Structures are given as structure tokens and as C-alpha cells.
Amino acid sequence: MSGWIEVCDADDIEAEDVMRFDHGGRTFAIYRSPDDLYFATDGQCTHEKVHLADGLVLDDTIECPKHNGRFNYRTGEALRAPVCVNLQTHAVKVEAGKVYLLPA
Amino acid sequence: MTELRIVIVGAGECGVRAAFALREHGHAGPIVLVGDEPHLPYERPPLSKPTPAGEPLHKPIVAETRYAEAGIAFIKGVAATSIDRHDRQVLLADGRRVSYDRLLLATGSRPRLLPGATSNGRIFTLRTLEDAEALRARLAAGGRLAVVGGGFIGLEVAALARRQGMQVTVIESGPRVLMRGVPEEIAGHIHELHAAEGVDILCGREILGIDERTGSVAIRLSANRQAEADLVLVGVGSTPNVALAEQAGLAIDNGIAVDAMLATSDAAIFAAGDCCSFPSALAGGRRIRLESWRAAQEQGELAARNMLGAGEPYTAVPWFWSDQYDHTIQIAGLPEMGVSVVHRELREGFILFHLGSTNRLVAASGFGRDMAVAKDIRLAERLIASGMPLEVTRLGDPQFKLKELLSA
């Protein structure tokens, strides 16, 4: 995979929320922070195969909907047991009202 | 304080979490973790989803190397047989004596059995890895499974067995499934879901006797019914493992009785997880015992901090989930403490908000496809913890965002 991929309109994700995005056989979670910045991580929790897009975003953290593992979605850092493996993050940019993703 | 010798008896989710939490909170002294199972500590096997044949059911809680890295002495496959409170030592089955300054009992619980039923290789309970492996090996297409007890374990196994092509009957002595802690409306949906999948659910049936035959088991039921099965799974609740504590003279009350800080009647000994009962503020100070994955984690963590002197009470909102087919139930708080209910419809499920007498949220229970209820239940959990009075009409409005209540 190479180059930026168009994900959605910037308005498609609410502030302090997350959306699932599938592309090229991979799944991602795309976040909009409370201060309207956009971020992306791998879609599934590093503990079990549960999609993070069903989880709750509060400030800088995403909480896995199942085991309550928490990550900082800006950095991918695992914050609370049972998760101990960091999340892979991906570059995101917003241009002309569209969100783009560059998978790592 | 940091050189305290800390011993943890029980190496399940609770004991393991406690051991690592001690290090995370700066404890530099010795930590000994004693587990009576012959395995590296593992997550309780999920049987709500089929584990493909060949895929191991043993899923370590943490990798083996991390115990040594964290300086945790893990004693595997050795039971603790008694506690010498005077000399502050734990006696192990192999004759060793381990000294402690603080002791955590995380001894868990064990499945209740049916009186009078001996196992002839056809009657199973589900708790350990061995239980799960034995059951997996016997779940075979075309066979007949009788599940005794319409609780979570029974229903999750029923769903799994249906997916494997078995004929399944669930026998429940109460008037409905999920009598404990699950509102009737949600239990009704679960019942329908199982019925639609072809599970035969018999409620209000007492078991009069179990006849073990050569090739099968016959369960005699009230109202002149009988269920015949090749395999029986008994899921009628669990009993806290209190023998060690009881023998040591610690207070017992539906589990090892602890105070709000998780200390037992001996200030040097703590208990956490399935094995303990604690006074719950949400339950109006009544003593309750939780048997959930989350409580085991949180109590293990808190007991660790309190053994180091934090002095914090356990106030976490109880929470658990159960997967049934492609649906999930999630419950936060104690629904039975509610006096009124507000229904909130979601896109692929619904949530019941259980309110106390002053419009404070005491529980939320959700049922829906996959993780449809997860976000709102998580927010509800925070609203329960906050104890703030809520506007009832807004909770039921599907357009209203619960998050706004938190920032209010």
C-alpha cells in the first residue's frame, strides 16, 4: 500500500469520537479529538480481536469496548491493563474537508 | 514500607494483576505468587465462541518472561495448605513455609455441583483449562447436551453447542433464565434468541434425579418430564474458596469477609476477587460478592495498593458482559437496586437505565448486536459513579448524547 487514502469527510466523525475504516484488507480506527484534530490507529485492540471503533473516546484515550483496556490514540500508548502492547498509529491529514490516511 | 514481603495465594486474573500492580506502584520488596494449577496463569477460557480445533485454549495472562523481569517469584502447581498467622507464614503442600508481612488471598471460586451426581465422564462443570479442554473435546455435532442452570455459563455453552450442531436443552429451576442480576426484559430477549436458535429452554423445572446409564444420562424433572443427554454441563453458580481463610480463623460471610479496603479480619491479610465479600455502597452498604473478570482485576489492583498503605475504599461500579451468539449483554451497576426504568433504543440494541429513588442512576443494562451497547454502557458507568441526579426524559431520547451529561 502506498500513498494517502481518502477516508471520509471531516464532518463524518463527531468531535471526541471514533469511526471504523476498512481498506486493503486492513481495518483502522479514525479519531477526531475534542480539539478537532484527526488521528488513526490499527482498528483492533492489541489484547483480543475487538474493534476499537465500538469503544468510548474520552479526551485523548480510547477504551476497548470489551476489556476496558485503554490507549492514548495520539501516540498508541497502552495505558491500562489488560493491554500491554501499544497500538500502531498511522498518519492522518485533513485537506479541503476530507480526511486522508497514510498506513504505516 | 517498600521492603514488605508480600505473598499472594491464587494465580488467576486477580492474583496476577495484584502482583504486577505492586511493582507498578513502587513496591521494591519480595513478591511471591502461589498458584495450585500446573500452568502458567491463564485467562479463563472463552467458551462463548468456538475456538478452532488445534488452537490452544491456554491464553497466558502475561508472558512467562515477565514474571522474572518484574521480580515476581511464581510458585506453580503447589497449593497453599494453611496460614500460620502468629508467625506470618503460609504453608505449602510441598512442605515449604513462605513468610509474609502482607498476604493476599485471591483463591477464587469453584463451580457448584449437583447433589448426588457423580461424574461418569458425561457430567461437566466449567472453570479450569482442563474443564474447557474436556468439554471442547466432547462437543460434537449430532450429540445431545443438557445444560443445568440458565445462568451465563450455561447459556454461553448452550450457544456454542448449537453452533457446533448439537441438540441443546437448558434446564432452569427458576421461573426464567438469568435470574441473578439481569432484568426480566433482557432475560426475555436472551430466551427468545436461544429459542430462535433451536435451544429448548425448560424453566421452573426441578431436578428430581440423575440416572447415569452406559451411553447417556437421563435427568428426571418435575412435571413428569425427562431430559436425556449424551453430555451434561452444570452451571448452577459457584462457591467461594474460603477453606484456607476459614481454617486460619478469618471472618467468613458468603466469602472471605473484607472491609471496604479489602482487608480481612486480620489487618495483615487481604482478600480480593471471587473469593471475597465486601460492603458495597451501591448496594446500600450490604455485603456483596462479585464473580466477574473486571472485579477480579480491579480488586487485585486495589488490594495491591492497600497492602502498600494506600487506604483506598473499593467503590468501582460492577460491570460485566456476556456474549451469546452474535449478541452481547453488558451490565453496569446493580439493576436490582433500581426503583424505576428508562428504556433507550439504540440502532442495534437497547439500554435500560435503572434509577434510584432520587433519579440517580444505579445501573444500566444493555442488550444488542456485537458491541452496539458498549459506548453507552461505558458512559452510564461514569454517570453511576458520579451519583448525579439525571433528567429522566433525556436518558430515553435516542437523539440525546449521553456524553453531554458528563460534561454538565
Image (cartoon, rainbow, N blue to C red):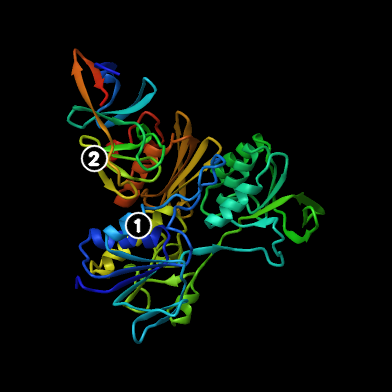
Residue B250 higher or lower than B203, as above or below: below
Q: Residue at x 49, y 40 (%)?
A: B328
Q: Are marks 2 and 1 on the same chain?
A: yes
Mark 2 to mark 1 CA distance (whole Å):
25 Å
Amino acid at circle 1: Glu
Dot 2 falls on a residue whose secondary structure is helix
- Disc 1 chain ID: B
Observer able to see residue B192 = no
- Left or right: residue B137 versus residue B306 is right
Identify the image quadrant of the N terminus of chain B.
bottom left
2 vs 1, front mark: 1
Q: Nearer the viewer, residue B227 or B33?
A: B33
- The residue labelled by disc 1 is B298
Q: Which mark is residue B407?
A: 2
Residue B88 shows up from this direction: yes
**Amino acid under label 2?**
Ser
**Chain ID, mark 2:** B
Q: Quadrant of the C terminus of chain B?
A: top left
Mark with earlier residue (2, 1): 1
> Which residue is situated farthest in the bottom direction here?
B86
User: Residue at 30% across / 19% down in the picture?
Assistant: A1
**Residue nearest the observer in this picture, A62 or B195:** A62
Q: Where residue B389 sits: x, y (%)? A: 32, 47
Q: Position of residue B367 (x, y in %)?
A: 49, 39
Quarter of the image holding residue B210?
bottom right
Helix, strand or loop at disc 1? Answer: helix
Residue B146 drawn at (x, y percent)? 70, 50
- Give x and y (percent) for residue B223: 80, 54
